[in-house]
């Protein structure tokens, strides 16, 4: 039975940056408050749609794998902030990217979406129903932020990351996979104002989070998932060359590293630059780790995530021989002259106007 290996990778982050000081100018917070509690210094705000970031990241992953869009059999987009409810963002990406021969589907497992996507991609390749899968994690969470919700507004940013998966050769590829969920804790991290539940209810669109509940469960479930993935791969923690955790909060990451007793040199973090990009978090980090030479041929890479649902998952991957892209894509986002703060303020203004319009109709 085949298993999947990652043969291409790429990421896309919007050019507009919003710093902690920028946020402090429009809400009751400070750089010290945000940094000490999360480790985040800045994040990116998108001036384009979710699917546009996905196309750029996908194009770069295809080029790295030496493939063309019509080589892809299956397109998976992991996101909780899709362009539309219907159709899937994957179908919009397919049309823009030109993966005309691919089946296309979205999955929503919150911040664990990319790991869930790896599980699905590995499954369809193992079953022989697809040979080449393009998996994209992408989020435009800035559209869901609310300046009145300080605990969440300072945490999230926009971006996309992508990988190409093909049948593995030798002992490379996904060696183990574990995923889980606990729907009884769904309200611990949710978005109000979106979905059929809110039809007829003029509730603002925003992310709401129980920080303590999330922290406690994230540390426990990510730690257990990581241990299970290593064991199921017939490895020891000492065999792990690089841990790439979901980039949500430096305190959560530090707690997991202590629990696993890993050396900090074996942990990749970039949340200080991008904040929490949800399903895009791990693929962006994986792409940057490769670009920075943190992954060598034969490396054991451990990915672990936790997100809304509540969901969690981990996978142990034995990297193949190639750590350099076969090609480069010239895909880029269109330019913008707006700063991250200007984009976010404009988004807030539009949301407030929409909230007032819905309330007046009801």
Image (tube, rainbow, N blue to C red):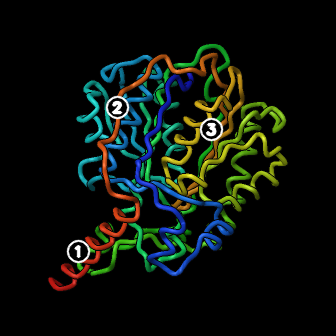
Viewer-closest of 251 and 164? 251
- Decide if residue 1 is in sight here: no
Query: Is tag 2's residue or tag 1's residue first in the polypeptide sequence?
Result: 2
Tell me, yes or no, whether the two marked residues, 2 and 3, touch with CB atoms within 8 Å: no
Q: Dot 3, how many residues are within 10 Å of its Cα: few (below 14), some (14-19), or many (20+)?
A: many
- Whether residue 291 is visible, yes or no, is yes
Which residue in the structure is indicated by mark 1?
Answer: 354
* Quadrant position of residue 171: top right
Residue 267 position by quadrant: top right
| Disc assigned to residue 93 | none
Q: Measuring 64% from the left and 41% from the top, which residue is drawn there?
A: 303
Q: Secondary structure at mark 1?
A: helix
In the picture, measured across the screen, residue 295 lies left or right of residue 163, that is right
Q: Residue visible at 49% across and 16% down? A: 326
Out of 205 and 232, give the one closest to the viewer.
Answer: 205
Instruction: Label 2, secondary structure: give it.
Output: loop
Of callouts 3 and 1, the N-terminal one: 3
Alpha-carbon span between mark 2 and mark 1: 33 Å
Residue for badge 2: 331
Q: CA distance from mark 3 to mark 1?
A: 42 Å
Q: Position of residue 29 (x, y in %)?
A: 55, 77
| Number of disc labels | 3
| Mark 2 → mark 3, Cα distance in angstroms | 32 Å
Question: Which label is found at residue 177?
Answer: 3
């Amino acid at each position: 039975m085949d298993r999947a290996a990652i043969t291409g990778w790429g990421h896309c982050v919007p050019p507009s940056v919003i710093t902690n000081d920028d946020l402090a100018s429009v809400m009751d917070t400070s750089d010290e408050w945000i940094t000490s509690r999360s480790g985040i210094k800045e994040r990116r705000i998108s001036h384009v749609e979710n699917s546009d970031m996905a196309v750029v990241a996908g194009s770069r992953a295809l080029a790295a794998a030496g493939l063309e869009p019509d080589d892809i059999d299956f397109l998976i987009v992991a996101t909780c902030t899709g362009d539309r409810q219907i159709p899937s963002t994957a179908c919009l990406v397919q049309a823009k990217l030109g993966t005309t021969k691919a089946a296309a589907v979205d999955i929503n497992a919150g911040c664990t979406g990319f790991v869930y996507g790896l599980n699905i991609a590995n499954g369809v390749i193992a079953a022989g129903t697809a040979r080449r899968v393009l998996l994209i994690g992408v989020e435009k969470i800035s559209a869901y932020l609310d300046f009145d919700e300080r605990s969440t507004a300072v945490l999230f940013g926009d971006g996309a990351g992508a990988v190409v998966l093909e049948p593995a050769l030798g002992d490379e590829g996904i060696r183990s996979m574990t995923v889980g969920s606990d729907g009884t804790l769904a309200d611990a991290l949710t978005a109000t104002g979106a979905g059929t539940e809110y039809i007829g209810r003029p509730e603002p669109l925003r992310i709401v989070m129980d920080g303590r509940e999330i922290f406690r469960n994230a540390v426990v479930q990510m730690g257990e998932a990581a241990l299970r993935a290593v064991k199921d791969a017939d490895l020891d923690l000492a065999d792990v060359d690089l841990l790439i955790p979901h980039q949500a909060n430096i305190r959560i990451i530090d707690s997991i590293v202590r629990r696993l007793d890993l050396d900090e040199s074996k942990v990749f973090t970039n949340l200080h630059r991008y904040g929490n990009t949800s399903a895009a978090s791990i693929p962006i980090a994986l792409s940057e780790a490769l670009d920075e030479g943190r992954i060598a041929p034969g490396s054991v890479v451990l990915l672990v995530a936790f997100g809304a649902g509540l969901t969690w998952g981990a996978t142990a991957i034995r990297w193949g021989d190639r750590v350099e892209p076969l090609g480069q894509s010239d895909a880029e986002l269109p330019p913008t002259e707006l700063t991250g703060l200007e984009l976010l303020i404009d988004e807030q203004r539009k949301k407030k106007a929409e909230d007032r319009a819905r309330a007046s109709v009801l």
